[in-house]
Image (cartoon, grey):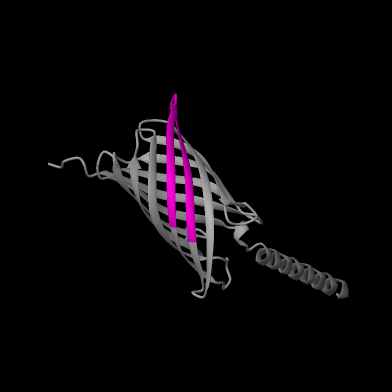
Amino acid sequence: MKKVCYKLNMRKIILLGCLSFIIHKTEAQKTAANQLGTWYMYNGSHKLSEKYALKTMAHFRYYEMASEFQQEIYRLGVNYKFNQKTNLTLGFSNATSDVAYDTSSIDLYEHRFYEDFNLKSNWRKFTLKQRFRFEQRFIRKNATTDQFVNWMRYNLHINYPLSNNWSIYAFNELFLHLNQSKRFAQNWTGAGFLYKLNNNIKLKMGYFQVKLPNEVLKRLQLGVIINTDFTKKTS
C-alpha cells in the first residue's frame, strides 16, 4: 500500500513539474519575436493626369493575427512621372505606435515627410522596381518627449507573372539612419502572391521578416491595392 501511495505521489510530483515547466516555457516564449503578426494593408494610386497621380496608403499592424496593436500608419503623396521608367513622389504620413508587445509601454505619435525616387525596368517576364526613400520623422513619445530621426530606405522589388491574374513577388528593403552613429535601423525581406481581381483592384498575401538590431519579427501581409484613372471618361 505504501508503495502504491509513493508511486501515486511521485506521478503527481512529476505531472506538476511538467505542467510548471510548460507554463513557464509558454510565458517565457511570449515575446514579439515569437509571434506571427499581421499587417492589414491598403495601397492606392490614382491617376490625375498624364504626369501626376495621387498616392494613398493605410496600414494596420498587429503583433498577433488580429490583436496586440503595434502600429497604424497613413500616407498621402503626390507623384510626378518623368517617363515610363522613372517617377518621383513627395508626401506626408502620420503614425501611432505601441513600442512593446504584451505589456504597458509608451506610445509614439509620429509625423513624417518623405521623398521617393522610383525606377522601373523589365527583363523578360520579370518586372524590377527600385525605390530610394528619404524620411524625416518627427516623433513624440507619450506626448512629452520629442525626437527627430532621419532615414534613408532602399527597396528592391521583383514581380513575376504566373498567369493573367496571378503573380509572385519578392522584396528586400534596407533602412539606414542618417543622423545617428549606428547606421543600421532595420531590414525587411519577404515574398508573396498577387491576385488581379480586375483592372483596378489587386489582392495581396505574403510573408516577410523584419530584422531589427536585437530581434527578428515575423509578419503576414494581407492587403488590397486599388488603382484608379481619373483621366478616363466614364459614359
Where's the C terminus, which quadrant?
Answer: top left
Residue drawn at the location 41% of the way across and 50% of the way down: 223
State the extent of the magenta-drawn residues as a range. 113-137
* Image mark count: 0
The quarter of the displayed image where residue 228 is located = top left
Dominant secondary structure of the residues highlighted in magenta in the image: strand
Q: Is residue 206 left or right of residue 183?
A: left
Which of these two is toward me, 144 or 7?
A: 144
Spot occupied by residue 113 in the image (x, y as percentages of width and height): 43, 56
Name the one closer to the observer, 58 or 167: 58
Residue 10: horizontal and vertical position, in percent? 82, 70
Is residue 188 within the magenta segment? no
Tell me if residue 126 is in the magenta stretch. yes
Q: Is 91 rendered above or below residue 109?
A: above
* Residue extending farthest right: 3
Relative vertical location of residue 103 with respect to residue 93 in this rendering, above or below: below
Left or right placement of residue 226 versus residue 232 in this view: right
